Image: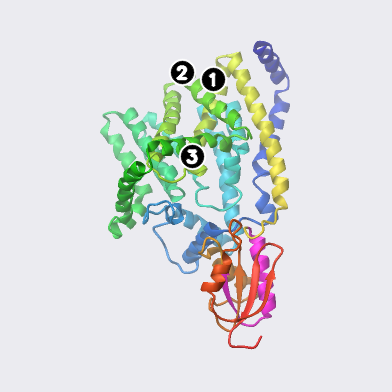
Amino acid sequence: MFTKFYVDLKKFIKKNYRVLVYLLFVLLLFLTIFPRSVEILNQNPVFGFDQGRDYLAAKNIVVNHHLTLIGPELGSGSAGISGLFQGPFYYYFLALAFLLLNGNPIGGVYLMWILSVFAILFIYYFGKKLFNFNSAILAAFLLAISPHFIAQARFAWAPYPATIFVLLSFYFTYFIFEKNSLKIFLAAFFAGFVYNFEFAVAFPLSLGLVFYALYIFREEIKNYFYLILGFLIAFSPMLLFEFRHGFLGLRNSALYLIGNKAGLLHHHSTHSFFMDHLQSFILNTQNVFPTDSLMIGVILVLTIIGVSLYYLNTDSDQKLKRFLLYLLFLIPVYFVVFSFLRNTIWNYYLTAIDLAYILLLVYIFYRSNKDKNRTIFSFALIMVIILTVSGLFNSIKITLNDYGDYGGTAKLKGKEAALDYIFRDAGGKAFGLLVFTPPVYTYPYDYLAWWYGERKYHYIPYQKEQGVFYLLIEPDSSKPWSYKGWLQTVVKYGNVAWTKIMYNGFIIQKRVLNEKV
């Protein structure tokens, strides 16, 4: 069956090659641009806790000229390691978007879109270096339809720019077999540079590169100098910050690891942590490939690993073989490193693993075609076609649904509508604004009160219970009553003039202090 399918397919491709290439290019362009452009088209991105905090940091850089050596704290302060921070360059990237679009929060989405599209172009270029033109197109296709990498283009978030820098590290890691000093340096630099976006991606990626370098370099000491130099420069903001603050983050990391052992003993055994982390790795298969079936995702990943090992065992291209073994090696490295974490393994921690899966699947496609292994090639091609159709369907469905999604209190337009209502009611008079939001910290509202209020209404509300002031309440969907405690314990003054529940979910209350209502 596979033999006839393979022969007929070859004839069909040869006969219609130019038409097929044109159609593939159009389809790739569609899959790259269409699902990634929703928030750019409707100008309504998510603007929550992280986006507000990060835009305030960008404002601090651009407006207040306050440079920084650190980014947000790991896990936004909930990772369990206090005093350890992501790198600062995400803030500087966001500051550039801030500068170009005059502080408009949509600027961060444009930045993410550009980085996401550039990653697809780069994996195509890298695929040509690793394999050939057809395989490069396939690599770009798989990245274009991956749910994880589509999400990275749709709203500004610190972990999302990591993809292009992981690919750059992979690219130069592929060439360190040549033992070129510049490429060794750049492989280490980009692996470390990822910490500016997500430390949980950068650390195991860097550790995996160190082990791989030990295997490649052996006793050639001079090559380690360029490797170490790359890491030192990439992590230099963190090292400078740690030096200035008595190595606070490193000391807290050591305490976390010591406490981890105690915690594991206290919570029965390592079994629960192992199973929780294993489940995260398994569930991630649906994140990288567009399939609604967890079973298909698991089978696909296990097939990728198994068939890759089978082919690499006989591959005569030592440079390619060693690089792909490095990609496979990253999977257990990430798992072992994360075994020390007591918190959840989020899917964006596994960005490098997702990219490894894509490149390994492309390798299977490339090798099976090169070796004329009709069974494996046919199976790989059928799987790619299924994934492409699934990705195309999901892209259209999700895009059409999300384009009209107003977003309630989570997205930009909902927040702007609430502020519009307050500013218009104030009628140009001075007023204050106090905000309740489930994350407690009011970063997105602080930023929008400054940016939106200043640019549209030429006024920034004060944050006091004084004169006329408004309460802007974002109810917690899981605990819709929780804001009542805030009203009883935090906001103690002022006569209530009126209370309005808006169509987007916000509750607005007007109060007047020392005046008649």
Q: Mark 1 near mark 2, Cβ–Cβ under 8 Å?
A: yes
Earlier residue among tags 1 and 2: 2
- Dot 3 amino acid type: Leu
Up/down of 40 relative to 173, above or below: below
Q: Secondary structure at mark 3?
A: helix
Q: Position of residue 357 (x, y in %)?
A: 52, 31
Front position in the image: 310 or 419: 419
Amino acid carrying label 1: it is: Arg
Label 1 element class? helix
The image shows residue 382 at horizontal and vertical percentages of 65, 23
Nearer mark to the viewer, of 3 and 1 = 3
Circle 3 packing at 10 Å, graded few (<14), some (14-19), many (20+), is many
Dot 2 corresponds to which residue?
315
In the rendered structure, the answer to whether residue 170 lies left or right of residue 415 reads left
Q: Quadrant of residue 286?
A: top right
Decide: few, some or many residues near mark 2? Use Cα within 10 Å; few <14, some 14-19, many ≥20.
some
User: Mark 1 highlights which residue?
Assistant: 367
Quadrant for the N terminus in the image: top right
- Amino acid carrying label 2: it is Asp
Nearer the viewer's eye, disc 3 or disc 2? 3
Residue 72 visible (yes or no): no
Q: Which residues are magenta?
A: 411-435
- The residue at 45%/35% (across/down) is 275
**Image height of 251 relative to 68, above or below:** above
Label 3 to label 1, Cα distance in Å? 26 Å
Residue 478: say if magenta. no
Q: Which residue is mark 3?
A: 350
